[in-house]
Image (cartoon, rainbow, N blue to C red):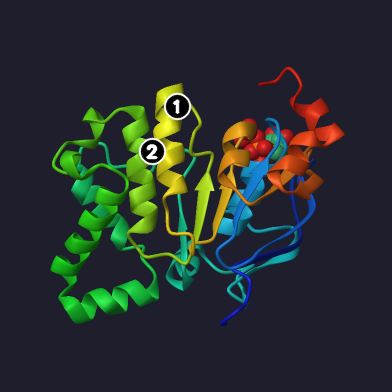
Amino acid sequence: GAGAPALVVSGAGKRYGGVQAVVDISLELAPGERMGVIGPNGAGKTTLFKMIAGDVRPTTGAIEIFGRDVTRMSTARRARLGVGRTFQVSNLFRDMTVLDNVRVAARGGTAKARVFWRTQGLSDAVTQSAFEHLESVGLMSRRNDTVANLSHGEQRQLEIAMALVGEPDLLLLDEPAAGLSATERTTLRELIEQLPRTLPILLIEHDMSLALGLTDRVMCMENGKHVVTGTPEEVREHEKVKEIYLGRR
Ligand code: ATP
């Protein structure tokens, strides 16, 4: 409902057989807030992201989005409710054009966006929205190129356009900078920085400096467990975080 936090995770845990991937994680994302989740490999970041996006069901705890309990809701229903997300493993159609990828992604748009497009004449309205989001990620001039011809960094930019085209009210970014060069990282960072300040963002990222530079608040995890949540400065100066990240990157 109105004024409800964009996202509330309450005591979420996930066990895979004998592996406790995530243990009792709670977090809250206020309207318009940008939050990062950092931690070393195996910390449980990806599992937490998947529980929030709806790819896996938590073994314990609950997840609320805009005041609605989505713990057992499908990814498609979460998308219609307002969630836009990227994928760690690319979700792109490599043989299709950039524009067509964004058009296809629009089918996963929010209920609100789909109603609007229908009233505007679906196909033209979707193309218009695709153009806007390609422009906002700097890929407008590449719209008729085949995805396979894009650089790795451009493919990440496209994935963000695809997450945005459905007009989400909450954006989930899964390790957006993974595998990118320093230059590509800078482009991506600028792109995320210039997203509307009203859009709440949860960003899972291994790269601590990127996550800290882009967010208002950061949570660090290790071995599935919460280590600390605070401002980027507080997290950077936290003894345990320093220990965890020392010599790793
Ligand atoms: P990375 O940076 O490598 O993505 P992460 O912080 O995202 O690490 P997860 O991928 O969430 O960590 O993994 C947390 C733990 O859960 C690891 O020990 C991992 O081996 C285990 N795990 C993750 N997915 C599964 C699965 N499907 N089956 C069994 N174990 C899993």
Q: Which mark is residue 193?
A: none
Circle 1/circle 2 CB separation < 8 Å: yes
Local SS, label 1: loop
Question: Where does the image place residue 6, in percent across and percent down from the top left?
Answer: 59, 68
Residue 240 quadrant: top right
Q: How many marks?
A: 2
Local SS, label 2: helix
Which image quarter holds the C terminus?
top right
Question: Can I make out residue 203 in this image?
Answer: yes
Give the answer, above or below, for where 1 lies relative to 219.
Answer: below
Measured in 3D between alpha carbons, the distance from the residue under mark 1 to the one under mark 2, in whole angstroms, is: 9 Å
Residue labelled with disc 1: 180
Residue 141 quadrant: top left
For residue 26, side relative to residue 169 (left or right): right
Question: Can I make out residue 181 in this image?
Answer: no
Question: Please, what is the three-letter code of the amino acid marked with disc 1?
Answer: Leu
Question: Please, what is the three-letter code of the amino acid marked with disc 2?
Answer: Arg
Residue labelled with disc 2: 156
For residue 239, side relative to residue 248 (left or right): right
Question: Where does the image place residue 78, in percent across and percent down from the top left?
Answer: 50, 67
Q: Residue at x 40, y 28 (%)?
A: 184
